[in-house]
Amino acid sequence: MPCATSQELEITEEFLMSLLCYVGAARSAFIAAMRAARAGDFEQAQANVKEGDQALKDVHKSQTELIGYDEGAGKVQMTLILTHIQDHIMTTMLCREVTEEIIAIHKELKEIKS
């Protein structure tokens, strides 16, 4: 993932777009995990969760860099795109939690049907 800031310590467009792409990849992996669980493929579901976790970890690391750079001093200007990215990060984190529950439910259903 590209660095959060350029030499002038401004948030680059490349950085913002990469954040959006990584968080999108994480969300897609979690959705794929739920679909794999519904199909009964729990190994694939766990592989998808692992993939999503790695992408989300990368996003969270970069988000933490931004917070550290800002130091609560307002150095990072909140823009519509940053707000949009933050919204995606938060909903993807929620999607991650829901994914675990959905996988567990499908496992229980499979046991009941067996």
Image (spheres, grey):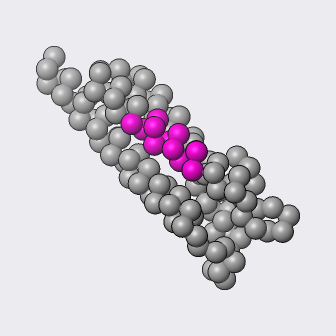
Query: What number of labels is visible?
Result: 0
In this rendering, does residue 56 appear at all? Answer: no
**75 sits to left or right of 23:** right
At a point 19% along the width and 23% down the height, the residue shown is 111
- Which residue is painted at 39% across and 36% down in the image? 31
Magenta segment main secondary structure:
helix
Q: Is residue 110 above or below residue 61?
A: above
* Residue 65 sits above or below residue 74 on the image: above
**What's drawn in magenta, residue-wise?**
20-31
Q: Quadrant of residue 66?
A: bottom right
Residue 75 in magenta stretch: no
Query: Is residue 67 toward the left or the right of residue 34 in the image?
Result: right
- Find the residue positioned furthest to the left: 113
Q: Name, please, the residue furthest toward the right.
A: 7
Query: Horizontal and vertical percent for residue 88?
Result: 47, 54
Residue 63, how many percent across, how many down? 61, 60
Q: Is residue 110 visible?
A: yes
Q: Quadrant of residue 42?
A: top left
Residue 24, image x, y percentages: 51, 44
Above or below, 73 relative to 32: below
Q: Nearer the viewer, residue 69 or 10?
A: 10
Most distant residue in the bottom direction: 73
Residue drawn at x 79%, y 68% as measured from the top left = 9
Q: Residue 79 appears at what percent x and percent y? A: 58, 70
Q: Is residue 43 left or right of residue 79?
A: left
Q: Quadrant of the C terminus?
A: top left
Name the residue: 28% across, 38% down: 102
Q: Give left or right: position of 18 versus 6.
A: left
